[in-house]
C-alpha cells in the first residue's frame, strides 16, 4: 500500500530538469520517485544531525569504557 504523499514545491536548475526528464524517458520511472530517493539519500547522510532516541548510556561514560 502506498503511503500518503505531501505536495511541495522545489526549484531545480534547467540542467537538472533536463537530465531528470531524460532519465525518466529512458527508465519510465517518474521524476518524483528520483527526487524522493535523493531526499532519502540526504536524510541518511545527515542522520547524525537529526534528533533520535536518546541512549541509556551517556556519551562520556561510553567513551570511558
Image: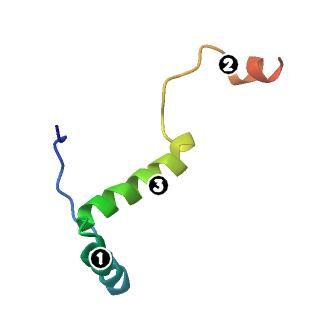
How many marks the image carries: the answer is: 3
Q: Is residue 37 above or below residue 2?
A: below
In primary-sequence order, the first of circles 3 and 1 is 1
| Element type at mark 3 | helix
In space, the residues marked 1 and 2 are separated at their CA atoms by: 50 Å
| Element type at mark 1 | helix
Name, please, the residue furthest toward the top. 56
Given contact means CB atoms under 8 Å apart, are the residues at marks 2 and 3 in contact?
no
User: Which residue corresponds to the image point at 52% horizontal and 43% vertical from the top-left?
Assistant: 47
Question: According to the image, label 1 marks what residue?
Answer: 26
How far across and how far down the image is residue 63, in percent? 79, 24
Q: Quadrant of the C terminus?
A: top right
User: Which residue corresponds to the image point at 54% horizontal and 50% vertical from the top-left?
Assistant: 45
Residue 48 image-quadrant placement = top right
Given contact means CB atoms under 8 Å apart, are the residues at marks 1 and 2 in contact?
no
User: Which residue corresponds to the image point at 67% horizontal and 19% vertical from the top-left?
Assistant: 58
| Element type at mark 2 | loop
How far across and how far down the image is residue 6, in percent? 18, 50
Question: According to the image, label 3 marks what residue?
Answer: 42
How far across and how far down the image is residue 17, in percent? 30, 80
Question: According to the image, label 2 marks what residue?
Answer: 58
The mark lying in front, picked from 3 and 1, is: 1
Residue 27 image-quadrant placement = bottom left
Amino acid at each position: 500500500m502506498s503511503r500518503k504523499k505531501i505536495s511541495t514545491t522545489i526549484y531545480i536548475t534547467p540542467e537538472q530538469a533536463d537530465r531528470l526528464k531524460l532519465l525518466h524517458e529512458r527508465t519510465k520511472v517518474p521524476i518524483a520517485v528520483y527526487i524522493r530517493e535523493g531526499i532519502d539519500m540526504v536524510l541518511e547522510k545527515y542522520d547524525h544531525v537529526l534528533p533520535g532516541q536518546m541512549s541509556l548510556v551517556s556519551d562520556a561514560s561510553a567513551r570511558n569504557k
